[in-house]
Image (cartoon, rainbow, N blue to C red):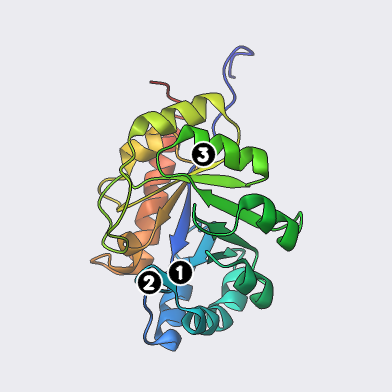
Amino acid sequence: MASEDAPPQRERCRLYLITPPVITDVEAFTVQMLSALDSGDVACLQIRQKHGVETDVDATRAVATAVMGPAQGSGVAVIINDSVDLALELGADGVHVGRDDTPVEEARRRLGPDAIIGATCKSSRHLAMQAGEAGADYVAFGAFFPSPTKTETTPADLDVLNFWQSAMTLPCVAIGGLTVANARPIIEAGADFLAVSAGVWAYQEGPAAAVESFNALFDAVHKDAPYPTTS
């Protein structure tokens, strides 16, 4: 039995999937996604369809129409990248906004109290605190590694996760080039969720195997180091 003076046990890290930025065969992707979701715990699916830095509205709509029902039926929250308008139109569970997108306060006002709102905070504790005060449900730090799906990124290091986990209760998401091979230090530093795209969809043994492997890693880290680490 744990001591009464022991810190509360940290929640197990979970997987936050992000779609490939371009999906040419939506039907094939939907089959692939369902296989991945059947292979282990996934918290969220973010639909991110881009032409460069611009959201591809038609592609986002097409992918969301195909995958949202099956994903939500599997207990996975569906998040739209960047666009509050699309999140409203599609009936998504929430939106993820960047620094140049709709402010968190406006997203909350438009989507209502039950929507999931996440905010990109790069490597900034200050931006993360502001996002939390504005009503974000989670903050995202990264990139922790070079990303094949997003070439223009701001480097982040483990210190921001150490700090956030030891001082804050708002969940944090780690993003940027994360794979089964490199993710363990990120989990140990305090990420509540790992946002992964290519690390799942381009996994050598396939997306289903990647989801299974990530979940095995989460279980192992949680068992070995269930308490927050501090720098």
Q: Where is residue 55 in the image (x, y as percent from the top left)?
A: 46, 73
Q: Is mark 3 on a helix, strand or loop?
A: helix
- Label 1: how many residues lie within 10 Å, few (<14), some (14-19) or many (20+)? many
Q: Where is residue 218 in the image (x, y as percent from the top left)?
A: 42, 44
- Label 2: how many residues lie within 10 Å, few (<14), some (14-19) or many (20+)? many
Identify the mark nearer the N-term, 3 or 1: 1
Q: Do the residues labelled 2 and 1 touch (CB within 8 Å)?
A: yes
Viewport quadrant of the N terminus? top right
**Is residue 129 placed above or below 89 in the rendered structure?**
above
Name the residue at 30% across, 69% down. 206
Residue 127 is tagged as 3
Residue 21 is tagged as 2
Relative depth, front residue between 42 and 164 = 164
Name the residue at 35% across, 68% down. 207
In the shown orientation, is residue 199 left or right of residue 132? left
Residue 118 is tagged as none
Q: Do the residues labelled 3 and 1 touch (CB within 8 Å)?
A: no
Q: How many tags in the picture?
A: 3
Q: What element carries label 2?
A: loop
Q: Position of residue 157 (x, y in %)?
A: 32, 35
Viewport quadrant of the C terminus? top left
Q: Amino acid under label 3?
A: Leu
Residue 95: image quadrant is: bottom right
Q: Where is residue 30 in the image (x, y as percent from the top left)?
A: 46, 80
Name the residue at 49% across, 52% down. 99
Relative depth, front residue between 170 and 109 = 109
**Can residue 113 be seen from the camera position used here?**
yes
Identify the mark nearer the N-term, 3 or 2: 2
**Is residue 6 placed above or below 121 in the rendered structure?**
above
Whole-angstrom CA distance, mark 3 to mark 2, is 25 Å
- From the image, tell me which residue sits under label 1: 48
**Can residue 11 be seen from the camera position used here?**
no
